[in-house]
Every structure is written in structure tokens, then in C-alpha cells.
Image: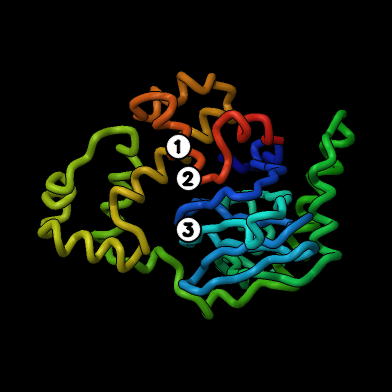
Amino acid sequence: MELNSELKLQQLEMISACFERSTFSPHIHEGFSIAMVQQGTQRFQRDRTTHLANPGQLLLINADQLHDGESANPHLHCRYHALYPQPELLLPVVEDLCGPGAGLPWFDPVVDDPQLAQFLAQLFQPASSTADLLSQQVHFLQGMALLIQRHSRKYSEFRPLINAPDKVRTLRHYLDAHCNEVVSLNTLSRLVNLNPSYLTRLFVRHTGIPPQHYQLMRRVERAQQLIRQGLPLIDTALQTGFTDQAHFSRHFKRFTGLPPGRYQRALR
């Protein structure tokens, strides 16, 4: 996502979703996940601890943070609005509030701030004109500033994933670049000069998931990008390395909680 003098809010992923029995497998987003729970209770793991987010609360996942999710009540639909801002959208807000070099914010998993949740939910009103788009852009910046001012921890209080060893970063970058390809553990082993067993344990230790899970997660993220760009679902499945539509749908729902078609319709 480019961010020069213009706020690219039209590139911000925003989803309104409803699910009952869907579960999210452990995964990571490159950006932040900010969900406003409208109905039901969402249960999720973050930092190896289980949390509950109730109606009116904010469910917050930091960039590059392992998490999962499901409805806490299998008989009650869970509805929510969610924003997925990339770090480069939040950095200018942080630097404006805290000065250059302040780094990314770090949020607790559940925030009880119904006023802020309602404020952010207003972003989901469609922009039908240039004036409306300007209003949404300002509204987004104001909402992010309030979120950071009220609920962000100091940068020094957490350890971001970038502190992982160089070899783990090398593996992640390789899997990012080759997410649609068949990659063997032997290839990864030769890449960082580690035996496969130690490599796997090291990767899990620093990311929380094994390499093949990480690659599949990145493949689904690439599929999300292609769907947002308007590519048909069948072409998306083929371009992201899935063997067929059923294989694509199964893994897509596993990571996002929605089948590809519903995800496509839920995009704003």
C-alpha cells in the first residue's frame, strides 16, 4: 500500500461479517485487526491466552500477531465490523501524536470502549460522493488517534516479531515470496543452513506456527488481495496455488471464517 501525501483509505480492507459455527485457525495478519462486536461473543486466543469480546467491545489484534477465533456461543450468530489497517496507515498517526521514531502501537486484546467502537463503526456507512470520502478519511484518522491515545501501550513494553533471529526472518521472506509454489523443508534447510528438525522448532518458537502453516496463511492472504482487485474466484484459486475450488474454499474459510464467495460479498 502506498502512502505519500494522500491517505489511501479506499485501499483499507473493511468487512462486515456474521458467523455462527465458523472458526478461524491460528494465523497472522501483516496489518492490524480492529473489530467492533455488534452481536454475540467472539472467543479467541492471543498471546496464548483465551479472551472474550462482547457486544460494544473492541477486539484488537496487533500486526504480525498469532491469533484464532470462533463464536463463543454455537447457537448465536456473532456479528461484527472489522478494519484491517496496514502499519503504514497508522505510523503517521503515531508520529503525529508521539514524534518520529515512536514505532507502531501495541493494543490489549479486548478494549471496553463502546463510544469508540460506535465511532469506528460509522466508517462502514458507504461513501457516495467525494465529500463523503473526505469525511471518511478524516473520521478514520480521528478514530485511530483516539484508539492510540486511549489504549496503546508504550513501544518499549512489548517485543515485536522483528526481533526474531535473522534466519527466521530469512525463512519468512522466502515463504512470502514463494507462497504460491511447492516449497520443501529441504529447500528451507539449505537456505539457512539448519537441519530440518531444528529449523521447524525455531520457526514455531518465534512465530507460533510451523512453516507449512505460515506459507498457507500467506497464500490465503494473497487470495484476499486478488479478490479485492476483482479477480474471479476460480482464477484466484489457480493463481494462488490451490489444486481446485474445493481445496481453495476449505483453506480460505479455515483462515478467514468465511467462504470466498461470502468474503467477496462482505467487502466494503
Q: Residue at x 46, y 19 (%)?
A: 235
Q: Which mark is residue 64?
A: 3
Q: Residue 232, image x and y in percent?
A: 53, 19
Local SS, label 2 = helix
Residue at horizontal 50 percent and vertical 76 percent from the top? 158
Q: Is residue 18 left or right of residue 196?
A: right
Q: Amino acid at mark 2?
A: Arg
Q: Which mark is residue 250?
A: 1
Tag in front: 3 or 2: 2
Q: Which residue is located at x 28 percent, y 59 percent? A: 168
* Mark 1 → mark 3, Cα distance in angstroms: 23 Å
Picture quadrant of residue 193: bottom left
Circle 2 residues within 10 Å: few <14, some 14–19, many ≥20: many
Q: Give left or right: position of 99 versus 69.
A: right
Residue 95 at x, y = what percent? 65, 63
SS of the residue under disc 1:
helix
Residue 110 shows in the view: yes
Residue 252 location, x and y as percent? 48, 38
Kind of residue indicated by mark 3: Asp
Mark 1 neighbour class, 10 Å CA radius: few under 14, some 14 to 19, many 20 or more = some
Visible residue check, residue 7: no
Q: How crowded is the residue under tag 3: few (<14 C-alpha within 10 Å), some, or many (20+)?
A: some
Q: Quadrant of the C terminus?
A: top right
Which residue is tagged 2?
A: 254
Q: Count every numbered label the image shows and give the total.
A: 3
Q: Looking at the image, is mark 1 or mark 3 earlier in the sequence?
A: 3
Q: Secondary structure at mark 3?
A: loop
Answer whether labels 1 and 3 touch (C-beta < 8 Å). no
Do callouts 1 and 2 mark residues in contact (Cβ within 8 Å)? yes
